[in-house]
Amino acid sequence: MSGRTRLALCAAAATLMASCALLPLVSPATWIVQAVLMLAVQSAVGAVARRVPLARPLTVAAQALATLMMLTLVFARQQAFAGLIPGPQTFLHLAELLREGADDVGRYAIPAPQTDGIRLMLVGGVLVVGLIVDTLAVTFRSAAPAGLPLLAVYSVAAGLSDDGTGWWWFLVAAAGYLVLLLAEGRDRLSQWGRVFAGAPRAGDVETGGATAPARTGRRIGALALGIALVAPLALPAMQGGLLGAAGTGVGQGSGDGGTISAVNPLVSLRDSLNVDEDRTVITLRTDTSDTSDLYLRIVSLDDFDGTTWKPSQRHIVNVPDPLPAPLGLDGGVKRREVTTTISAADSYAQDWLPMPYPPSSVRVKGSWRYEPVGMTLVGDHKQTTRGLTYEVRSLQVRPTAEQLATAPKPPAALRREYTKVPKSLPADVASTARRVTEGAASPYDQAVELQDWFALDGGFQYDTRVEAGSGPRAISRFLKDKRGFCVHFSFAMAAMARTLGIPARVAVGFAPGTAQPDGSVAVGLKDAHAWPELYFEGVGWTRFEPTPTRGTVPSYTRQDTPSTGLPEQSSPSQEASTVPSAAPSVNQSCPPEMRRLQECGAPTEQALPAESGGGPRWYAVVGWTLGGLLVAALPLTPMLWRRRMRTVRLGAHGRGEADAVPHILAVWQELGDTAWDFGIPPDESQTPRKAAVRIIRLGRLDEVAAASAHRLADAVEQVLYAPRPCPVAGLAEDVRRVAGGLRGTASRRTRLRAALAPRSTVRVVWAASARWNAFRSRAGARVAAARTALRGRSGQQGSGDEAEASG
């Protein structure tokens, strides 16, 4: 194995070892297998290009082309020519996948699901880093700066993970980098590390300094590891990128009185509801006359572990303006936009911003970040609501019972995430849900049956003095005792809805407050509330109210509400006219996750074949990639073969008398083939001197090139006729000077043909024909010998039989 091949393997290994730091970010981590295969192909292309050899820029271009073709095959084969050759639609599709991946990174908690967008970001990122490392360390023989892209991979993983990537992943990446440094080669490593190496040792002198590179590499590695492990202690920690395990900025405020904790509302909600004095904590003014539906939502709890509900750890971003349209809401659902000005009391210090749901824009001072999945704002750098006044524009969504009853199935990814229940959930929770909803015709009917069972028909009593309870059997005890407050009702209904296959989560915030004479609405501590939200396609996350005597029952769940939605006809038409700007139709503004799951309706059905394949098998990826590279390389095969032959013939041979003859003859053949490529066919009947004169005359060579041709002819004659041929120096340069002279006098068309389709490549066909004829001759001789042997044996056997018979 050559030094460059070994270095290329080390570069690929270092890239993969650094990329292992990304494994905890996505589940399942099967993308790494795809990255390994594609990185192997990328490295192989580089090795072949350097073997030819190609110029350094052409080597990098060949690897980049191979990388693009592999990404096209895996992620955009339906938008490419023959499923492999990228075109304009390919780049548009890849850009769209990257955008969706960026959205998914901000939407999902760690570990995030392996969506197509995230997989493209991971695999493509590894390939880009691999290309950079291979280019620096192998193509340009500079392994030291190749550590920068490897460090970038680890830094990305550390910045996105919950509490920083584990130190063991850093050690894995550092080990790969050290292997790369040691493999770069003795000379360059010794020069780069001389300042660390110190004085040579006696053993090094005896062995020619063979141990110096290893010793230097160890010293460099120890120094780099020491700096990397100690430096972070002096640097500020990375804050604000992700919610921590307890939810960064989530919890009780430091002001007087209780606040609602988004992580553990079980205790804080009960304490708020049981205060002796119902102190006002929020005052609001709104431009809608109907405030019965004006719930102030703080945070959504979507992670159910069987013991409690809590918010998932999710990525937070800067607050966009306007906020994105809510997930799942299409243009057929009636809604209007309202503006609400909210003022928080000085005693109310909440880390999450209470807002009506779904918000469409927020004007707030201070340091706030946006959590896209729950559409909530969380304070950054100890920012709270204390004494804050802000304005929220939100949508009052008014679906009809018919729209909810006929809602299609939710996207598969959303259904998987929001219908998960732990194995520890008692079986009687699911069985009770099935019994209560027996006979329901749709998920909406099931949801209404659950709500009415808790609020009206099930005999439940609202009691804030009941302990919140914990443990996997808390819901079972509540269903048996039938006493509790909003936490019990919302938690139980959401869990039961999930057992029925209805996506569900729990919202925590405030129920509608009390209207004041001055037109404002006062929200007190006793208005603290929790309620379930169930997802219906076309409407999005929809509020239900199972807690008796608390809040307001949504109009779309009232059994006496006509399905035609007549109560909504009193809404002024001009209010509805403002809707399109806030929530465009599904066909025009389908969310990225819906397009990815092919749930966007008729306008995107044409794209279904492009997404329905689920991706090719791994062996198909490798096979198609190698086949595509072979097809792309076929037109370049003559050029690559000639470059390879020229490199072999003009290599560093002929230094001694033993190899003088083959070297000089190979150089002479290269001269003849070069002239043939420029339109001067060989004439085997002429002597070397006459052949050189012919090349000079037909090629119109200048004096310098002509002198080189004569020296080559003299060297060949010396080899052919001298009793002891001697090596001649500078013959390779003579051939290059003759080639330069031929190129200078040839036309552009001749030069292009000599480079791309050299005539001398016909020697490959001649050689193949000669080998085939030789093979046929050997095979024929062996067959004839076998037949002769068989005839001889049969003749001997016949003679023996005759002798036995006569005896």
Image (spheres, rainbow, N blue to C red):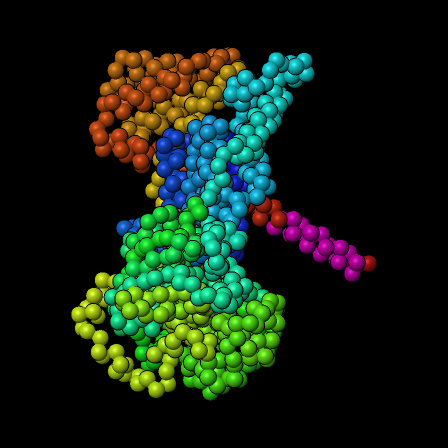
Residue 600: x percent and y percent? 32, 67
Would you say 775 lies left or right of 60 here?
Answer: right
Region in magenta = 787-805
- Return the residue nearer the eye: 87 or 25: 25
The structure residue drawn at horizontal position 21% and vertical position 70%, both measured from the top left corner, is: 576
Would you say 112 lies left or right of 355 here?
Answer: right
The structure residue drawn at horizontal position 61% and vertical position 20%, both measured from the top left corner, is: 212
Q: Quadrant of the C terminus?
A: bottom right
Would you say 321 lies left or right of 371 here?
Answer: left
The structure residue drawn at horizontal position 48% and vertical position 14%, both measured from the top left corner, is: 727
The structure residue drawn at horizontal position 65% and vertical position 16%, both measured from the top left corner, is: 204
In this rendering, the answer to whether 6 lies above or below 420 is above
Is residue 41 shown to the viewer in this render?
no
Q: Quadrant of residue 346?
A: bottom left
In this rendering, the answer to whether 720 lies above or below 288 is above
Residue 103: x percent and y percent? 38, 54
Count of numbered circles on the image: 0
Asked whether residue 804 is drawn in magenta, I would say: yes
